[in-house]
């Protein structure tokens, strides 16, 4: 083994979103030898345009917020491996082993899993056929391609409402199609309802996404009446929720019925020295501030484990 593979870190963090970055900040403040491994930086938050509910900022673009996260972490000189994917993990024994796509296996006394989540697919006919050709899961990434176009947003929660707000800047017409009544925050619902270019269809199922070389329409059906409609659109933004990125630990850590890692109030997973935080866990309310707070908890719990303190009693 080379020096890198011989080294044993005190904390290894998997994931570069708010949970993972805040965990790294807290472990560094406890002077723990830490390494953070992530394919990308920013996590799911990078797929939104701006944030209005993060304490201290009445409004901030997510690019700026992520940059501030990174700059804060950089001050502590935390070792990072960015752009590589974790391929396997061995959590048995007192020294955990994490193998990465660069061929290196890293060792650590504790592991914090902060792998976040990804968009849930609609599973409508034609969806897979038109990914990248009119079907998108990220309004922040793809809204600029639909300037003066007619588009549809599928979903009724906060992410769907935020996508509509993103698209209102560029699109000519926006159809919002939800299987249920709108469930997002009232402040977002009110903002969307006031937009003249938005038409909302609640309690409609999206049956199919149609097109030839690219998307040219969607078929929707009213749940109560069975009435069918064909909406002519060039883009479809699917915003119906998230799926946890927990495949790495399936069969290793306890998961709930939707694949989230089960954790207790100290972010413990059931294996000594292994913690999880943020959207990949069963902690409710998938919010940036919640993920960041859980990252701090996971880091402090790992510190307590490493120094042999009684769980739950940590100094700041």
Image (tube, rainbow, N blue to C red):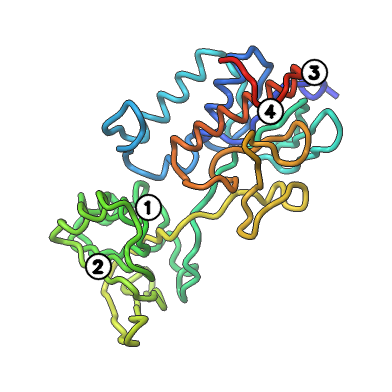
Q: Is residue 81 above or below residue 148?
A: above
| Residue at 60% from the left image edge and 49% from the top image edge | 245
Question: What is the residue that sits farthest to the left in this orientation?
Answer: 196
Which residue of the protein is positioned furthest toward the bottom in this rendering? 226
CB atoms at circles 3 and 2 under 8 Å apart? no
The answer to the question of whether label 4 and label 1 lie on touching residues, with beta carbons closer than 8 A, is no
On the image, numbered disc 2 is attached to which residue? 200
Identify the residue position indicated by label 4 in the image: 12
Closer to the N terminus: mark 3 or mark 2? 3
Q: CA distance from mark 1 to mark 2?
A: 15 Å
| Residue sitting nearer the eye, 273 or 43 | 273
Relative to 51, say whether 75 is above or below.
Answer: above
Look at the numbered disc 1 and give the secondary structure of its residue: helix
Front residue (pair 12, 315): 315
Mark found first going from the N terminus, 2 or 4: 4
Q: Which mark is residue 3?
A: 3
Helix, strand or loop for disc 3 = helix
Going 58% across and 24% down the picture, which residue do you hit?
Answer: 24
Q: Residues under labels 4 and 1: Cα distance? A: 31 Å
Residue 49: mark in rendering? none
Q: Quadrant of the N terminus?
A: top right
Residues under numbered marks 4 and 3 in contact, where contact means CB atoms less than 8 Å apart? no
Q: Position of residue 288 (x, y in %)?
A: 44, 38
Q: Which residue is mark 1?
A: 159
């Amino acid at each position: 083994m080379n020096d890198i593979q011989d080294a044993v870190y005190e904390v290894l963090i998997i994931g570069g979103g708010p949970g993972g970055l805040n965990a790294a900040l807290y472990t560094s403040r406890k002077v723990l030898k830490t390494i953070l491994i992530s394919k990308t930086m920013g996590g799911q938050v990078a797929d939104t345009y701006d944030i209005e509910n993060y304490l201290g900022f009445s409004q901030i673009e997510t690019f700026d917020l992520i940059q501030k996260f990174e700059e804060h972490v950089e001050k502590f000189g935390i070792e990072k491996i960015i752009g590589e994917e974790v391929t396997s993990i061995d959590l048995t024994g007192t020294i955990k082993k994490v193998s990465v796509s660069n061929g290196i296996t890293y060792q650590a006394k504790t592991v914090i899993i902060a792998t976040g989540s990804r968009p849930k697919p609609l599973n409508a006919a034609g969806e897979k056929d038109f990914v990248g050709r009119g079907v998108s899961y990220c309004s922040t990434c793809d809204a600029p391609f639909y300037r003066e176009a007619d588009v549809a947003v599928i979903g009724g929660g906060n992410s769907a409402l935020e996508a509509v707000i993103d698209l209102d800047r560029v699109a000519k017409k926006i159809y919002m199609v939800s299987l249920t009544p709108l469930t997002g925050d009232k402040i977002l619902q009110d903002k969307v309802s006031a937009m003249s270019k938005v038409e909302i269809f609640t309690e409609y199922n999206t049956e199919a996404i149609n097109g030839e070389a690219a998307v040219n329409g969607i078929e929707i059906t009213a749940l109560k009446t069975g009435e069918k409609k064909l909406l002519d659109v060039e883009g479809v933004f699917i915003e119906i929720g998230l799926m946890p990125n927990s495949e790495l630990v399936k069969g290793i850590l306890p998961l709930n019925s939707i694949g989230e890692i089960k954790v207790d109030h100290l972010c413990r997973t059931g294996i000594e020295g292994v913690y999880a935080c943020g959207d990949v866990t069963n902690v409710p309310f998938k919010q940036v501030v919640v993920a960041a707070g859980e990252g701090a908890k996971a880091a402090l719990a790992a510190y307590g484990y490493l120094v042999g303190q009684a769980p739950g009693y940590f100094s700041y």
